[in-house]
Image (cartoon, rainbow, N blue to C red):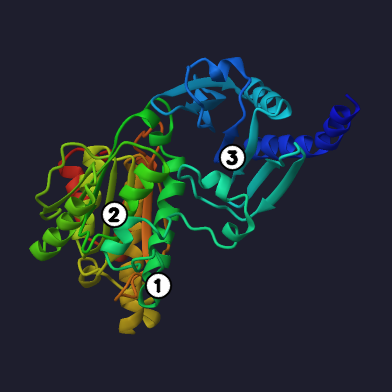
Amino acid sequence: MAADRDLTEFNAPHLARFADLLRQAHDQGRLSKLLLVAYQGGVADLDAAGQVLQRVMVRPVILRDAPHLSFLLRYPTKDITKNLPVAEGLAQIGAWLADGAFRNAHLHTPTDEVQLAFSKKGKASVRVGKPSNVEAPGAEEATATAHNRDKHRFLDASRPFLHELGVTDAKGQVLPTMSRKWKQINKFIEVFAAALARSPLSQPPHDQEPIHVVDFGSGKGYLTFAIHDWLRHTQHRDARVTGVELRQDLVQLCQKVIDTLHLEGMDYEQGDVRHYHPAALNVMIALHACDVATDYAIHLGIRAGAEIIMCSPCCHKQIRPQLLSPHPLRPILQHGIHLGQEAEMLTDGLRALLLDAAGYDTQVFEFISLEHTNKNKMILAVKRAQPTPSEEVVRQIQDIKAFYGIQEQCLEQLLKADGLLPA
């Protein structure tokens, strides 16, 4: 009894610290998710399924305009979801951890990962480090060992598709010549993961529904296969991913990889964004679509009601010939390089505003350069929960066009033709 009392006293400050960090993360809007793993048994509500509980994932959600915590209990053949008010949910988590129901808890925020771990003797410890994103079965326990905490990636280099695409060798080691590509793939998944977390696709009931992803101009498929693997293998989502590519040789190459690995929920098709009509679309990706092909891709995403739109524009030819050089900018814009930079800024700025007007929260930022190009800008749009079109943004667009003498912008014309912009 004295030993149990001593252990309880030893663990109390560690449990309190973890509880405080969890509460702060939620209250500050930084809670991405909480994973409870290595279930030890003994909790009636968790044993009720008649199977061995694998893990519990907790995420913040809004239900009936009130914050809640959504608990996903994962068993070998079924998932059970429970939604609790925040205070009740935090109390439940604290009780489970205090009773030793789980040996590990992982608190994920955009900037940190906090790990609460119990030793074999039941002693608790709390560690705070940089985010890790390994969620494959068994990976939570692996992160408790030091050699796996050195470098965390969103994808495991041992995944078979990486070897089939020539990124890794037969032992799952990244080839020196592909280290840059490996970094790019992980950066892409990092950006997508953050967008997915704040999109309607992560809110009930959509978090239990299939995710339909279409990647236009998908090329050799590095990112297409990566997003499929991350969604299905790491996030355990029912992902249906389609790569659309003009070049038939690349379509055949990627389809061969799909067939070799017997990948479910993935396909490759030959096609063009201007003529492709997906049956369902939640995530639209178009990297390095040249000139107005980016506008057609964004238009398709908006028209289909995609929750996430990701574009990395290439070439900005339509607006540049239309531009006036208004006073007092004329002396600066007499230089061709400045005029080109201005055309790029205006083109992508108008695209972002048009997405905003169509009901999306939009960001434009520098993305890690992809292979064989110095184009590194990303337009990322996440559909708002209440995607009300904005007439004020439409007026801002008209003011910008009038100032620079812009008569035509492809995306605006496409949206107006479909009635997707306020008059």
- The residue located at (37%, 29%) in the rendering is 208
The residue lying toward the viewer, choosing from 356 and 293, is: 293
Residue that carries the numbered disc 3 in the rendered image: 31
Q: Residue at x 19, y 44 (%)?
A: 416
Q: Nearer the viewer, residue 266 or 286?
A: 266
| Image spot of residue 134 (x, y percent) | 49, 49
Tag 3: amino acid? Leu
The residue under label 1 is which amino acid type?
A: Arg
Tell me residue 277's x, y (percent). 13, 43
Mark 2 and mark 1 lie on one chain; the one further toward the N terminus is 1
From this view, report whether residue 258 is shown above or below residue 150: above
Task: Give the vertical position of 346 relative to 275 (above or below).
Answer: below
Nearer mark to the viewer, of 1 and 3: 1
Measured along the vertical axis of the image, is residue 151 above or below residue 138? below
Write down the residue under mark 1.
180
Nearer to me, 104 or 315: 104
Q: Secondary structure at mark 3?
A: loop
Disc 2 versus disc 3: nearer the observer: 2
Q: Residue 98 shows which numbered tag?
A: none
Cα gap from disc 2 to disc 3, whole angstroms: 28 Å
Mark 3 neighbour class, 10 Å CA radius: few under 14, some 14 to 19, many 20 or more? many
**Residue that label 2 marks:** 225
